[in-house]
Image: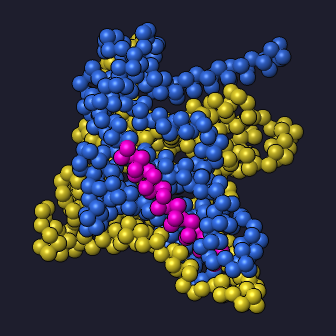
Chain colours: A yellow, B blue
Amino acid sequence: MSLASNARAFERIENGLVIESGRARRRPLRVRWLPYALLAPSLLFLGLFTYLPVVRVAIESLYDQPHGTGAAVATFVGMGNYAKVFADPAFRQAALNNLIYAVGTLLPTLVLALAFALAVQRSTRFASVLRTVFFFPSLVPLVAAASLFFFIFLPGLGLLDYYLAKIGINGPNWLGDSDIALWSVIGLTVWKNAGYYMLFYIAGLQNIPRDTLEAAMIDGANAWQRLRYVILPALVPTTSFVVVIALINLLTSVDHVIVLTRGGPSNSTNLLLYYIFQAAHENFEIGKAAAATLLSVAVMLAISLGSLQVMERGTHAKA
Amino acid sequence: MQRLEKRLWPALLAAFLAAVAFLWAAPFLWTLVASFRPEGVGSADMASLVPDTPQTLENFRNALESGSFGLYYVNTIIVVVGVLAVQCVTVSLAGYAFARLSFPGRDALFYAFLLQLMLVPPTLIVPNLATVVDLGLYDTLPGVMAPYFASAFGTFLMRQTFLALPRDFEEAAAIDGAPWWAIIWYVLLPMAQPGLVAFAIVSVTAHWNEFLWPLMVINDPAKHTLTIGLAAFTRGAEGGKEWGVLAAGTLLVMAPLAVVFVAFQRRFVDSFVFSGVKG
C-alpha cells in the first residue's frame, strides 16, 4: 500500500509548516496527542462493537451458561460448545446450505452482472433506462424484496404460477418443497444483487483502454474473441473484488430467510447466520451461538485476508 | 442481404434486452398495479400485471392504519439520521487524522480500522446484543444505532477525499493561526462535501434497509422500524385477502429511497461504485 510513502511525504510538508508557524510565533501545529484524540471517537465504538465482541465470543464459546442465569454460574467446558456445534445436524446442514447458496448465487450473479454491464455500457437513453431497471432491486430492503417474492412464489395464485399456468406449466411449491426452496432463495438473491455488481463491471469496462479494443478489432477479432482475450483478462481485478464483497454479503444477510422460510422446510434454507440467530434469539444457547459466531468470523477473516490486496485495490479504485 | 442483417441483429438484441428488463422489473410492476387494485378483484387474478379500473387508494389507507407505518417511518428516520449525524463527526475527524497528520502507529491503526470491513456488524449480532444490554440500551433506538457510530468505510472515503484536496488553503489558514478544528470545519469540510454526500447516500440506504439487528434489539412494537413492520405485516398477510395491502405497505417502505434515487441517480451510482462495502 502507498500509505508509508504518503506518510513520508506529509512529514516533509508538515515539518516545513511547523518551522514556518514557529517563526510566526504560533503554537506548533503538530500536537502529539491530537491525532489520537481525533481517532478516539471512532476507536471507542470500534472497540465496543468490533474488537471486544470478538474477544467476548471467544471467551463465551468456552463456557456453558444455562439460559436465565448470570455469568457467575457459567461452567468452563473448553471445546465442548464447538463439539456440540459440529455434532449438531442443523449446523452441518446450515454450513452445507450456505456453501450451496454462496456458489449457486455467485456464479449466475457474476455472469448476469457482466452481461448487464456489457449491454448497458453505451450512453444511449435506452441503455440508461436498462441500467436503472437492473440496478433498482439492490436499492430496496432485502425484507421488501422478500415480501414481494413471498407473493411471487405463492403456490397457485402467485405471480410466477399465475403466468406459468398461462403457458401450460404447473409450477412446483417454490418455498414449500425442501428440494427447491433453497434455489428459490438463490433466485431472489441473484435478482437482488446482479444489478449492484453490474456497477463495478461498468466501471471496470470504462477502464479498458479504447486502443486495445480497437487494435483487437483491426486484427479481425470477433465479438467473442474480444470478450475472451481482451475484456475478460482486463476485468480480473474487478471480478476478484466483486467475489470478495459478494461472499461477505452471502454470509451476512439472512433477512429474506427470516421473512420467507425461517430456515425451513426441514432446515433446507437454514444459513449460518440464521442458525446463529436462532441459537441465540430463539433457543437461548449462548455458548453454541458464540462458538458458531467465532467459526463464521474465522471464515470471514480467511476470505478477507486472503484477498486484502484486492480490497485495497477496490477502495482505491476510484479516488 | 448483409445490410438487412446489420440492422436486424441490433433490433433483435434490443428486443431481447427489453424483455429481460421487463422480467427484472416485473416484481415492482406487480407491486404498483396491485397496490392500486380494488378489493373486489378477487384473489384468483391478484397476480395479474394488468392495471384495473377504477383504481383505489384504499390499500394505502389500510396499510397506514393497520400496520402503523406512520410510526415506523418516524422510528426509521430517527435511526437513519442519528447514525448519519454521529458518523459524519467520527469519520471526518478520523479521515482527517489519516490524511493529514503523521504519528507513530498510524499504519497499524489504519489496519485496525480495516478490520471492520471484514467483521461486518451482522456477523457479531450475538456479542453486540450482549454489549447493548450491558450498556442499558436494549429496546432503545440508540441501541440500534450504536454499532454503526464508527465507520471504517466512511473513514477511508473521507481520507481519500481529503487527500485529493490541495493543501494551500489549510496552510494559509494555519499561518493565520486557525486551530485544527477551525481548519477542518471552515476549510476542509466545505471542499469535502462530495465525499460526505457519497458517504451519506451509502449510509442512509444501508440503515433504511436494515432488518436483522433492529429486530434483535427492539422488543416494544412502538419502536419498530419500517423493515420490522413490513416483515410482521408480510407474515400476517399469509391468509390471502390482504395482498393489495401488502403491496401498498411494501411500496411505502421502498418509496422514499426510490424517489431520492430517481432524483440523484448519477450520485447514487457513483457512491455505490465507490463503496463496494456497505457503510
Residue A27: say if magenta: no
Residue at screen point 67% across, 32% down: A128
Q: Is residue A14 or residue B11 the one in the foreground?
A: A14
Which image quadrant is residue A308 in?
Answer: bottom right
Instruction: From this view, report whether residue B275 is shown above or below residue B209.
Output: below
Magenta segment, principal secondary structure? helix
Q: Is residue A96 or residue A36 the one in the foreground?
A: A36
Point out residue A238 in the picture as x, y percentages from the top left corner. 63, 52
Residue B92: say if magenta: yes
Residue at screen point 70% across, 42% down: A228
Quick check: A64 left or right of B144? left
Instruction: From this view, report whether residue A19 is shown above or below residue B199.
Output: below
Point out residue A274 in the picture as x, y percentages from the top left corner. 31, 50
Point out residue A180 in the picture as x, y percentages from the top left corner. 34, 33
Quadrant where the N terminus of chain B is found in the figure: top right
Q: How many marks can you see?
A: 0
Is residue B194 at all visible to an observer of this figure?
yes
Point out residue A55 in the picture as x, y percentages from the top left corner. 33, 73
Residue at screen point 23% across, 40% down: A266
Quick check: B187 left or right of B255? right
Residue at screen point 26% across, 65% down: B136
Q: Is residue A19 or residue A242 the one in the foreground?
A: A19
In magenta, the rendered stretch is: B74-101
Quick check: B65 left or right of B274? left
Is residue A176 at all visible to an observer of this figure?
no
State the residue lying farthest toward the top. B53
Instruction: From this view, report whether residue A218 is shown above or below residue A169.
Output: below
